[in-house]
């Protein structure tokens, strides 16, 4: 007796189709799973057998062989439980396979026959739609994320629900979801507001530019100056995610297993703030079967690294590739995977171990050697990849005690969105480029043309500060963003001058 059921597995953040084949022979009882299964797939034998029996169906007495094709790719996770059970029931004649080829199914089984949520369902739904499969059967808790793709999604809670759907006896209708409603709900989320921050107008201006062009930024200042406070209010001024951005980001969170059951899409940009004790594998991803790390979970969002020098040196150095390329490649002996990692880096640090170097209100207790060793934890190549270096000084009592006078996040966000609209129009048709910070050298030459006065200012800055070729490109990108914020097509001298000052602080602190 033979049967085949369609399922899918996730490799990286994308899915591929898997045929779950079952062959039952009248031989000595044995239950075997082949096709490079990992331990979680092998353990499914016990879950599937118990789930079938507790759903009111007899488990076949004989040799049961399940093949997961293609057999040359390693299979991981518990998502094959449901298709295995349905394939066994089909082979034994308890399911009439009239339309089983029209469904792709995935889900983990409980011992009582219930169907539990699993990872990567959004990726499976995308692949099913690409391959022209009419419908998808998923656990009820995964229905919202699968329905955003625009395919018929049937939410199920137990094995019997699946059998009724396949045989056309079920009252369960395809799950209906409005993408517009999902984004409208996301817009109601309340953020921390910039109006709460007293003083620090220079830093607020820098964060507005960083948000308008998706530039990486470092905040340097003494403890209590407001670095973390500013960083945590940064998401409130960023533009809303587009549908393409939301889909790709949600796929990553779904594969990582951190998407909430009631979430269909991540409509708000992620804000990830890992502790400084994190490992390099936790930051960029890894494991025997690689999974996305913090840099990928912050895709199209913000990666906030507080107390930057406290991170291990090898952990910080692995940030070079994702900052430069927008992807991270994890190579293992058996497999090499690439995860997207197009994030905005926001870093915060003290100027010295005690934190008060250069502070007019406190005396620094660090020796010159301690200060140098502390700053040496941030390598030159990593520092060069951060577009903006901003000094955040202590706030005087007069500003702390006075009434808030700064703009609120909503006002700043409106200007950021307007600047992003200009960039989206400029880069339409350019794959993977949504903001000025993502420009390649070709785009810089095309869109960052300077006047003779602007070139002279930039020449003086490069010569006197000894900036690198990468810093030269970063200044041009910053100048392009500042010009966009003013609605100007031509980069003016004062745009270049402002961009240069955001790059000069690293020479002052690391000289």
Image (cartoon, rainbow, N blue to C red):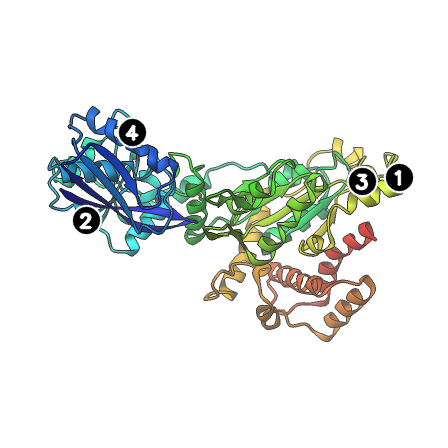
Q: Is residue 346 above or below residue 426?
A: above
Asked where in the image residue 62 lies, by quadrant, the reply is: top left
The crowding category of the residue bearing disc 3, from other C-alpha atoms within 10 Å (few below 14, some 14 to 19, many at least 20), is many
Measure how far apart labels 1 and 3 are at the Cα level: 9 Å
- The label shown at residue 46 is 4
| Lateral position of residue 220 relative to residue 425, left or right | right
Measure how far apart labels 3 and 2 are at the Cα level: 63 Å
Closer to us: mark 3 or mark 4?
A: 4
Q: Which residue is mark 2?
A: 102
Q: Secondary structure at mark 1?
A: loop
Instruction: First in sequence, mark 2 or 1: give its number.
Output: 2
Instruction: First in sequence, mark 4 or 2: give its number.
Output: 4
Q: Which residue is mark 1?
A: 367
Closer to us: mark 1 or mark 4?
A: 4
Question: As rendered, which of 321 and 307 lies closer to the eye?
Answer: 321
Residue 293 percent location from the top left of the image: 53, 43
């Amino acid at each position: 007796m033979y049967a085949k059921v369609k399922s899918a597995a996730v490799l990286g953040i994308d899915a591929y189709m898997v045929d779950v084949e079952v062959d039952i022979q009248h031989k000595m009882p044995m239950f075997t799973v082949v096709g490079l299964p990992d331990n979680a797939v092998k353990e499914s034998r016990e879950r599937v057998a118990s789930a079938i029996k507790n759903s009111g169906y007899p488990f076949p007495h004989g040799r049961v062989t399940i093949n997961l094709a293609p057999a040359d790719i390693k299979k991981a996770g518990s998502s094959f439980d449901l298709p295995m059970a349905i394939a066994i029931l089909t082979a034994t004649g308890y399911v009439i396979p009239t339309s089983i080829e029209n469904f792709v199914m995935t889900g983990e089984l409980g011992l009582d026959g219930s169907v539990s949520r699993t990872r990567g369902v959004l990726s499976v739904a995308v692949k099913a739609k690409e391959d022209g499969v009419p419908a998808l059967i998923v656990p009820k808790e995964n229905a919202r994320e699968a329905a955003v793709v625009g395919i018929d999604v049937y939410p199920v809670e137990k094995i019997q629900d699946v059998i009724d759907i396949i045989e056309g006896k079920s009252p369960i209708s395809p799950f209906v979801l409005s993408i517009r409603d999902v984004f409208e709900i996301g817009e109601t989320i309340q953020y921390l507001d910039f109006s709460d921050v007293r003083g620090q107008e220079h830093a607020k201006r820098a964060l507005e530019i960083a948000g308008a062009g998706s530039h990486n930024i470092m905040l340097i200042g003494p403890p209590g100056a407001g670095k973390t406070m500013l960083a945590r209010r940064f998401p409130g001024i960023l533009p809303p995610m587009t549908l393409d951005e939301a889909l790709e980001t949600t796929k990553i969170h779904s594969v990582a297993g951190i998407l909430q059951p009631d979430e269909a899409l991540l409509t708000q940009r992620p804000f990830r703030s890992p502790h400084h004790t994190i490992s390099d594998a936790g930051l960029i991803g890894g494991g025997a079967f690689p999974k996305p790390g913090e840099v990928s979970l912050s895709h199209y969002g913000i990666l906030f690294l507080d107390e930057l020098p406290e991170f291990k040196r090898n952990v910080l150095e692995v940030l070079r590739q994702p900052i430069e390329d927008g992807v991270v490649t994890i190579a293992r002996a058996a497999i090499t995977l690439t995860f997207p990692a197009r994030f905005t880096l926001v870093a915060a640090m003290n100027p010295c171990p005690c934190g008060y170097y250069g502070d007019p209100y406190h005396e620094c207790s660090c020796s010159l050697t301690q200060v140098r060793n502390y700053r040496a934890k941030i390598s030159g190549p990593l520092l060069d990849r951060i577009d903006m270096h901003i000094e955040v000084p202590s706030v005087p009592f007069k500003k702390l005690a006075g009434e808030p006078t700064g703009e609120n996040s909503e006002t700043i966000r409106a200007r950021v969105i307007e600047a992003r609209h200009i960039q989206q129009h400029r880069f339409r048709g350019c794959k993977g480029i949504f903001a000025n910070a993502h420009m390649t050298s070709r785009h810089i030459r095309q869109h960052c043309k300077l006047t003779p006065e602007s070139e002279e200012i930039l020449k003086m800055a490069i010569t006197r500060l000894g900036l690198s070729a990468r810093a030269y490109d970063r200044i041009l990108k910053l100048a392009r963003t500042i010009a966009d914020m003013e609605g100007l097509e031509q980069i003016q001298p004062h745009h270049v001058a402002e961009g240069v000052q955001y790059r000069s602080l690293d020479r002052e602190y690391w000289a």
